[in-house]
Amino acid sequence: MGFGLIGPRRDRHAVAVEQLDALALPVGDDGTVIGVDAEGRPAVLGINRPTAYDITLIGGLWTAQVLALRAAATGARVTVETGRGPAWTGLAQAAGGGQPCITLHDVGRVPPQGASAGSPVVVVRDCGMRPPRGRVVSGPWQSVVTLLPYLSPVAPRLMEKSALVGVQRVSPDEAAQVGRIMNLSQAETEALSTLADGVTLWCTARDRQFVMTQATDAETGLLGAARRMD
């Protein structure tokens, strides 16, 4: 004997074994979706990590800003170190629905960020062709993305120390240099000078992947269409 009223009786929630496959959910890598690969599958960048993670992007401001927006959407705090604040002001004001999830700082003026597993940080360094050594470096739960508009004299050093390198359309001479630094195949090297706007070759020490970044309607309204030049 129990206490209280007897509750309603319902059938058990059960499915046949042959129906289990219909309940499967597509689960990919954890991280920020930066576009789609050549087969149209989502390309995901795990940017929030418990270890130091450096990224060098030789490309346009548009791609860096899309990456910043999407990193913020995953819950990261995004800190932008830039010498062209007006180019980032609209993005910082629009992101986060009024919450300060993207903050802007002058070059060399980034304070300690206090990154943690519960509050990861992505530092975007938009400091021109020769970015000075940053006061805030990568560390646990704090990744650093360095944006270079072209292959500058400091690019080889940055590329060699980075865990991930992204390259957008460059000149044939620059492509040849990138190919030597990153050990690209001849086909990959030649493709670098013909890439469409929004396409990036992402490289690690072992892997290469061409990714097309496709903006959402909200991103297009804020940042405009994909472009390599600014």
Image (cartoon, helix red, strand yellow):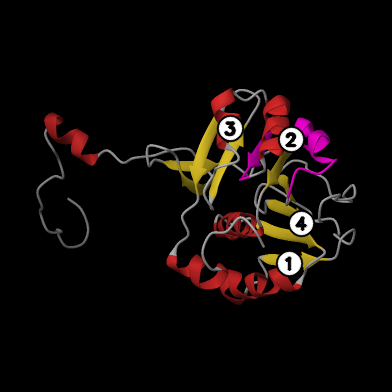
Reply yes or no: does residue 162 show up in magenta. Answer: yes
Q: Secondary structure at mark 3?
A: helix
Residue nearer the viewer, 21 or 193: 193
Classify 10 Å Cα crowding around label 3: few (below 14), some (14-19), many (20 and above). Answer: some
Mark 3 — residue? 190
> Residue 207: x, y in percent?
57, 26
Reply yes or no: does residue 78 show up in magenta. Answer: no
Is residue 37 rendered to the left or right of residue 6?
right
Q: Nearer the viewer, mark 1 or mark 2?
A: 2
- Using the numbered discs, state the Cα–Cα distance from disc 4 to disc 1 in whole angstroms: 13 Å
- Using the numbered discs, state the Cα–Cα distance from disc 2 to disc 4 in whole angstroms: 16 Å
Amino acid at pointer 3 = Glu
- Using the numbered discs, state the Cα–Cα distance from disc 1 to disc 3 in whole angstroms: 38 Å
Which numbered disc, 3 or 4, marks the residue that appears first in the sequence? 4
Which numbered disc, 1 or 3, marks the residue that appears first in the sequence? 1
Residue segment shown in magenta? 150-169
> Quadrant of the rendered structure where residue 60 is?
bottom right
Amino acid at pointer 4 = Asp
Say which residue appears at 15% left-offset and 59% top-offset: 7
Residue 18 lies, with reference to residue 115, above or below; the image says above
Quadrant where the C terminus sits is bottom right
Residue 28 lies, with reference to residue 60, above or below; the image says above
Residue nearer the viewer, 226 or 164: 226
Q: Are marks 3 and 4 in contact (CB under 8 Å)?
A: no
Amino acid at pointer 2 = Ser
Which numbered disc, 4 or 1, marks the residue that appears first in the sequence? 1
Residue nearer the viewer, 116 or 190: 190
Is residue 146 rendered to the left or right of residue 226?
right
Classify 10 Å Cα crowding around label 2: few (below 14), some (14-19), many (20 and above). Answer: many
Mark 4 — residue? 126
